Structures are given as structure tokens and as C-alpha cells.
Image (tube, rainbow, N blue to C red):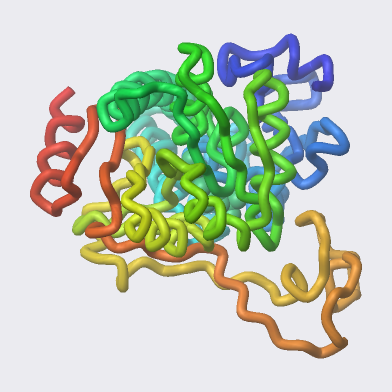
Amino acid sequence: MADQYAQSGEHNRSAGMSAIRWDEPPEGPVLALLDQRRLPAEEVELVCTDAPALVDAIRTLAVRGAPLLGIAGAYGVALAAARGFDVDEAAAALEAARPTAVNLAVGVRRALAAYRAALAGGGDPRQAAEAALSAARALHREDAEASARMARHGLALLDELLPGGGHRVLTHCNTGALVSGGEGTAFAVALAAHRAGRLRRLWVDETRPLLQGARLTAYEAARNGMAYTLLTDNAAGSLFASGEVDAVLIGADRIAADGSVANKVGSYPLAVLARYHHVPFIVVAPVTTVDPDTPDGASIEVEQRAGHEVTEVTAPRVPVAGAEAGGGIPVAPLGTQAYNPAFDVTPPELVTAIVTEEGAVSPVTAEALAALCDRSRQV
Ligand code: MRU
């Protein structure tokens, strides 16, 4: 890990990792991101000095994962305000950068509301910028706290569902310190099991096409000294069939009011496999990922990404200017069309439990989720 990350920050304490940090060098405030496009080969910082640069970083997955997108969005508003840019314009661009993870809009709106409230209360633009930054810092801190609580609730649930201990857990995509102010969501539960001596194996789906499992989850598991094994997404079926999976733990980008879960494409097939093989399918996400304004799974907008992510093997790097494709190694004939949804939606009846910082919901029903959200608002 680059030195500045090993030494910096109060957040992301998992093996010294800091996915995001606000900095104020003499040239003006910046948002520094650990560039996830370059992992695991290089630990490189990407410094954003304005909202358009951050929008680009979000679209190209330099910064990604639902909770971290919320934190980044909030800091992005604070950055635009601190540098004297048009804050409303920046907020609109940030919110629209990716459509599925509701946390992004939640984070942007929270910082924007703080900024506007300060102005409405007679504050000058500098004070309003400080209010936006305070809101972003608060969200960052709260996400770290939520992460620790999700890990506790999730481990308790795992122990209850699997009383024998020695859990063998399958996970998909990346849900650790790289996506959070703390140690993450689903990954944080696996990490808690590891620290308690009760994780026998973490099965890591590679997560095609952009390999968040292979590049990022394996990287985090290795850094934490966990027993992990990487598999191609297609190998999950035979792994279940041979009785090697005790539970599936995944995160979420948006949870609809009825309990439908949008997460990285490939999550839904795992839920179907888990049901067939009588294995618990557990979703771990902060309450901010539950969207009461999205009634059901069909109402969730699923991001469709460029075909070259499928027709080429490549890490998600910035496309070469002027080139049509992404600069990776072609694996399909030129001109091949690709179907490339970034997420899929798992219906609530396939979800054993949703674990949040406020506790677990099981069985997953609209009523139970609404009660959980009410409880969280009252705290
Ligand atoms: O496209 P990505 O890499 O942003 O997708 C991330 C995921 O799907 C994660 O599983 C999800 O955001 C939950 S992270 C806690």
C-alpha cells in the first residue's frame, strides 16, 4: 500500500487501507482516491480537484461500491463548494454518474442539503462549503460505524444459522474496505468470522467482466491473511453441488421497498443456486442502501455498460481517447455485440436475510424492512 494510505486517515482501518480521503494542500482542497482501476498491480492515488474529474472516476470505477459512492458523492459536493464551482450543477452531474447504487444520490443530496441550509441561514459561501464538508465527514464516519455494526450482526446470524462453526462462505464482487468508510459490508462479516477463528474458507467469485472479485476481494482477503480461494463465476454451481458452500454473503447497490436486491450481475444466479442447495443467501448493506422510493425490483434502474468490457479482457481503465474500444485484449470477433448489465435483481423470496447496522430482517418482507428503516430514522 502506498505510504500516504498506510499513514493517513481515521477511516478504513482494514490492513491500513484508505479508499478515500479529503486533503487540503496549499493549492486548494482535493479528494484523493485509491485508484481501484489499477489494483492489485499498483496502489496509486488519483487526485480529483473538481466534480467533473470525480464524475469520470466514478464512471470508470476508480471509485466504486455503493457505500463509498455515497461518501464520494458527498465529498464531491463539498469539493465543488470549496473551490467555488457551481454546486447545483456539480451535484446533478455527480448524482447522474451511475444510476443503480442509491447511496450515491443519498450522499450527494445530504451534502447539498447542508450547503443550501447554511446559505438559507445567512451563511456566506465559505461557511456553506464548510457545512457541506461537515456533512460528508459525518457520512464517512457513520459508514465506518455502520460497517462495524453490520459485521457484528452478520457474524451472530452466521453463527446462529451454522452452529457447527468453520464457515465456508461464498462472496461475489467486492464489499470490503475498498467500498466503505470502515471494513465494508459482506466482506466485513467474513472478516469478523476470520478474526473469531470461524472462517474456514472464503470462496471469491472472480466477478466478470471487470473482475472486482479477483482484483479487489482477493487483494483484501490476502492483506487480511484470510483463507481464500478464487473461482470463475461459472464454477459456483459445481462448488455448491459438492457441498462446499455453507452460506453466501453479498452486498447490495439498492434494496427496493419490497426487499428486492440489486447487486453486481451474477448475484441472482447465486441466489437461485443457494435456494436449490438449501444454503442461506445473506445480503449485508447499510440502511442507506434501502430505498423506500423504489417500490420493487422491476423499478430499479440497472446500469448498462459498454460492450467492450465483455468483448475484451481488461481492467476497467480509462478508454484511450478516440478509440472505440477500451484498449484491452480482444476475445471476440470485431463488431460483436455484448449484453453487459452491471447489476441484476434478486427477488426477496430468495433472500434468507438482509443484515443492516440496525439488525437483520428475516424473512425479508416489505413490512419488516419498513419497520427497520423507521427504527433507524428514530435513532
Ligand atoms: O460496479 P461496482 O463495482 O460499483 O459494483 C459494486 C457491487 O456490486 C457491490 O457488491 C455493491 O456495491 C455492494 S458494496 C458494499
- Where does the image place residue 273, in percent across and percent down from the top left? 42, 60
Q: Is residue 148 left or right of residue 219?
A: left
Quadrant location, the N terminus: top right
Q: Which of 165 and 71 is in front in this view?
A: 165
Quarter where residue 103 is shown: top left
Q: In this view, does 313 lie to the left or right of 186?
A: right
Q: Residue at x 41, y 19 (%)?
A: 148
Q: Nearer the viewer, residue 196 or 325?
A: 196
- Where does the image place residue 304, in percent across and percent down from the top left? 57, 72
- Where does the image place residue 222, in percent across and percent down from the top left? 71, 26
Total marks in image: 0
Q: In this view, does 212 lie to the left or right of 106?
A: right
Whether residue 40 can be seen here: yes
- Where does the image place residue 210, in percent across and percent down from the top left? 70, 57
Q: Nearer the viewer, residue 295 or 23?
A: 295
Quarter where residue 113 is shown: top left
Q: Which residue is drawn at 50% across and 23% down?
A: 199
Quadrant location, the C terminus: top left
Q: Which residue is drawn at 39% across and 57% down?
A: 271
Quarter where residue 76 is shown: top right
Q: Which residue is drawn at 35% across and 19% down?
A: 152
Residue, far bottom: 335
Residue, far front: 242
Indicate whether 282 appears above or below 254. Answer: above
Indicate whether 215 appears above or below 165. Answer: below
Whether residue 131 can be seen here: no
